[in-house]
């Protein structure tokens, strides 16, 4: 009997349930990635596709060292899988679930079709530590606020074993299909802006483990304080690796030997909470799927956004707002495909509460340019900052980017790094910013725009 393993956002060898299960009781196994161009274009931004290409190549190389070929073919995910299952008489198909709503639909359809053909379909969930359907409050309803969600999850948590890649020899069955090169996923689409990403990132499972070990040995010891300083190296930068399943939350959390009564340091606890914030994002997406493009808090559907904002949106994207830390952050994003979490909040607040541009526009830009762009986390973050999501910042909480810079980048380490024209920005308060005509002018008056936002938000509070 032959088994088929399908990859999507689980580009790793270890802690991979589909791989480990696929060899038990089967004579040979095929390892396959199906590039469904429509599906991946709809669910992955440009930066995502760059990472996908590099990560697939890394996975392919790692498997080759074990005398296994990762075959990459193109076609509709469901139709191509069914065609291959019938053509080569596979008895079972194994996948690790992809929690993007579009992939869920595809996997459900595939499950239905395989069942009609009497083919086994085994799916595994390593995206979540606990499946969202199993976490409910005392009333049997989904949690809508993070803190009680985390408290409940901590009580539920039990250490799960991290799976190692099978030590036994795996008989690899190669199917006779036209394969594509990984560069056909991204590089041939003339996305030259991403060529610079090579100098900042190395996708792949091996690098993910290295980053985890470096973080544990270094920044974790003072994480709670330095994580908010964009000019430091205080964060783990594991988010792109988590996004593509090159490492799992289960693997990371095992480093803590974490359990409900584990005496964590304040720094460890804070990092664990960040991992569970990611869990919460997937949890909300599962229970309230409409949040992908509509506010969780539905009363904000009628919020009065600006109607003619294309020029300001373009300046925000290009880092030309005249607000120093905002422009620095947008430059970092376009240069590296990543942005520090503190400046993600600052730039998002500026777009939605000073420029009064719909959060969906910012979410769309981040989705295309962030390497770690992930629908659950991206939507959660944007709705939180704009004030319409779960556990949202109150409508009157509006980040002042000038005060944020003074607090979190007091020596301008971050802004000087990402602004070639740093000296052309005002170094004073908002009054200096607006009055000195020799310097770059902001595209909006921070105080006046804040008052307009407060007035509009107060109408629907």
Image: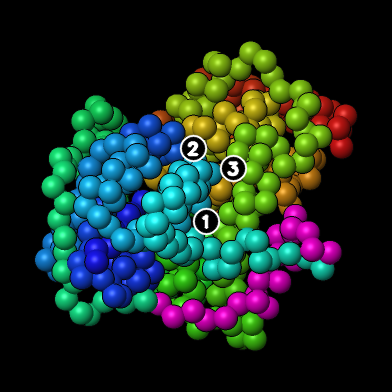
Q: Quadrant of residue 153?
A: bottom right
In the picture, measured across the screen, residue 452 lies left or right of residue 21, that is: right
> How far apart are the alpha carbons under marks 2 and 3?
10 Å
Callout 2 environment at 10 Å: few (<14), some (14 to 19), or many (20+)?
A: many
Q: Residue at x 72, y 42 (%)?
A: 296
In the picture, measured across the screen, residue 59 lies left or right of residue 139, that is: left
Q: How is the image coloured?
A: rainbow
Callout 3 environment at 10 Å: few (<14), some (14 to 19), or many (20+)?
A: many
The secondary element bearing badge 1 is classed as loop
Q: Which residue is mark 2?
A: 366
The label number, if any, that marks residue 99 in the structure image: none
> How far apart are the alpha carbons under marks 1 and 2?
21 Å
Q: Which residue is mark 1?
A: 229
The secondary element bearing badge 2 is classed as helix
Magenta residues span 139-162
The label number, if any, that marks residue 379 in the structure image: 3
Q: Quadrant of residue 447?
A: top right
Is residue 272 visible to us here? Answer: yes
Q: Residue at x 70, y 60 (%)?
A: 146
Is residue 415 visible to us here? Answer: no
Which corner quadrant holds the C terminus? Answer: top right
**In the image, residue 301 lies in the stretch drawn in magenta:** no
Is residue 341 positioned above or below 445 on the image?
below
In the picture, measured across the screen, residue 75 lies left or right of residue 130, that is: left
Callout 1 environment at 10 Å: few (<14), some (14 to 19), or many (20+)?
A: many
């Amino acid at each position: 009997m032959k088994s088929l393993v399908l990859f999507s956002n689980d580009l790793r060898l270890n802690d991979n349930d589909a791989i480990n299960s696929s060899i038990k009781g089967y004579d040979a196994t095929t390892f396959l990635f199906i590039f469904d161009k429509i599906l991946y274009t709809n669910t992955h931004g440009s930066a995502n596709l760059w990472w996908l290409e590099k990560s697939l190549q890394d996975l392919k190389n790692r498997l080759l060292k074990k005398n296994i070929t990762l075959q990459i073919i193109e076609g509709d995910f469901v139709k191509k899988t069914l065609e291959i299952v019938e053509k080569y008489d596979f008895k079972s198909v194994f996948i690790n679930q992809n929690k993007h709503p579009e992939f869920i639909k595809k996997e459900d359809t595939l499950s239905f079709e395989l069942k009609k053909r009497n083919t086994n379909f085994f799916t595994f969930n390593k995206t979540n530590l606990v499946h969202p359907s199993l976490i409910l409050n005392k009333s049997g309803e989904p949690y809508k606020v993070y803190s009680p969600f985390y408290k409940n999850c901590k009580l539920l948590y039990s250490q799960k074993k991290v799976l190692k890649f099978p030590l036994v020899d795996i008989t690899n069955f190669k199917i006779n299909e036209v394969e594509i090169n990984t560069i056909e996923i991204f590089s041939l689409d003339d996305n030259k802006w991403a060529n610079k990403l090579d100098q900042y990132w190395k996708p792949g499972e091996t690098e993910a483990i290295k980053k985890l070990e470096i973080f544990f040995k270094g920044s974790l010891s003072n994480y709670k304080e330095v994580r908010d300083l964009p000019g430091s190296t205080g964060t783990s930068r594991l988010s792109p690796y988590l996004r593509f399943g090159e490492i799992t939350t289960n693997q990371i959390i095992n480093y803590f030997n974490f359990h409900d009564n584990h005496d964590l340091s304040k720094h460890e606890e804070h990092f664990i909470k960040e991992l569970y914030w990611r869990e919460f994002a997937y949890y909300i997406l599962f229970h309230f799927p409409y949040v992908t493009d509509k506010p969780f808090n539905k009363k904000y559907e009628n919020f009065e956004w600006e109607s003619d904002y294309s020029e300001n949106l373009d300046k925000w994207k290009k880092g030309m707002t005249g607000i120093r830390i905002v422009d620095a952050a947008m430059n970092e994003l376009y240069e590296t495909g990543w942005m520090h979490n503190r400046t993600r909040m600052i730039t998002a607040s500026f777009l939605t509460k000073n420029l009064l541009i719909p959060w969906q526009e910012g979410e769309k830009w981040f989705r295309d340019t962030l390497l770690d762009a992930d629908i659950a986390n991206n939507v959660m973050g944007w709705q939180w900052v704009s004030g319409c999501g779960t556990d949202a910042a109150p409508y009157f909480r509006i980040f002042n980017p000038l005060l944020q810079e003074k607090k979190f980048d007091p020596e301008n380490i971050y802004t000087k790094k990402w602004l070639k024209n740093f000296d052309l920005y005002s170094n004073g308060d908002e009054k200096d910013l607006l009055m000195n005509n020799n310097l770059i002018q902001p595209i909006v008056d921070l105080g006046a725009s804040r008052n307009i936002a407060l007035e509009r938000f107060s109408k629907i509070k």
